[in-house]
């Protein structure tokens, strides 16, 4: 939870970014932000955070990538975010529910 609170500003910026900007933000993101994204995936997959039906539909095809991000090293997280989850819609569905709880 501390990681999410410290990275809240970065995550909010990433949520609002356009696709190209999101990819560059992920490329340049500090380690703690990538680990916070991993925590978001963990909380969603474990059911600690409730997500809406539309968010579930958005994240459904990316289950394998979310499971990988949950356990991977930092560089692997960065690579999967750039390849699989770098669309703003998917990133928003991953991070927004967790940020709503930390407010």
Image (cartoon, rainbow, N blue to C red):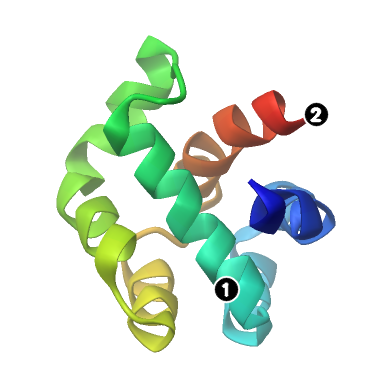
Of labels 1 and 2, earlier in sequence is 1
Horizontal and vertical percent position of residue 86: 46, 62
Picture coordinates of residue 89 (x, y %)? 50, 41
Q: Which mark is residue 37?
A: none
Count of numbered circles in the view:
2
User: Which numbered disc, 1 or 2, marks the residue closer to the eye?
Assistant: 2
Please indicate whether residue 56 sits to the left or right of residue 10 in the image.
left
Q: Secondary structure at mark 2?
A: loop
For the point 44% across and 17% down, the residue is 50
Name the one closer to the observer, 58 or 37: 37
Quadrant of the rendered structure where residue 83 is?
bottom left
Percent from the top left, x then y, of residue 40? Answer: 49, 46
Drawn side of residue 83 relative to residue 17, left or right: left
Residue 14 picture location, percent across and down: 70, 57
Question: Do the residues bearing badges 1 and 2 touch, measured as CB atoms within 8 Å?
Answer: no
**Left or right of residue 3: residue 39:** left
Residue 27 position by quadrant? bottom right
**Residue bearing mark 2:** 103
Q: Is residue 74 above or below residue 89?
A: below
Question: 34 left or right of 11?
Answer: left
Crowd class of label 1 (few under 14; some 14 to 19; many from 20; radius 10 Å): many
Residue at left 27%, top 65%?
A: 71
- Furthest residue in direction right, as rendered: 9
Q: Nearer the viewer, residue 89 or 73?
A: 73
Give the residue pinned by disc 1. 23
Residue 90's place in the image compared with 18, above or below, is above
Outermost residue toward the top in this view: 53
Estimate how packed mark 2 is, as few (under 14), some (14 to 19) or many (20 or more) residues with alpha carbons within 10 Å.
few
Q: Residue at point 29% right, 24% down? A: 57
At horizontal 47% and vertical 52% (from top left) the residue drawn is 39
Whole-number angstrom distance, CA of label 1 to CA of label 2: 25 Å
**Could you tell me which secondary element the residue under label 1 belongs to?**
helix
């Amino acid at each position: 939870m501390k990681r999410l609170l410290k990275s809240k500003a970065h995550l909010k910026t990433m949520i609002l970014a356009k696709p190209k900007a999101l990819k560059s933000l992920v490329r340049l993101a500090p380690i703690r932000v990538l680990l916070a994204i991993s925590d978001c995936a963990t909380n969603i997959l474990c059911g600690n955070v409730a997500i809406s039906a539309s968010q579930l539909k958005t994240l459904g095809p990316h289950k394998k990538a979310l499971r990988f991000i949950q356990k991977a090293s930092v560089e692997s997280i960065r690579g999967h975010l750039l390849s699989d989850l770098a669309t703003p819609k998917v990133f928003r569905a991953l991070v927004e529910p967790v940020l709503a709880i930390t407010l």
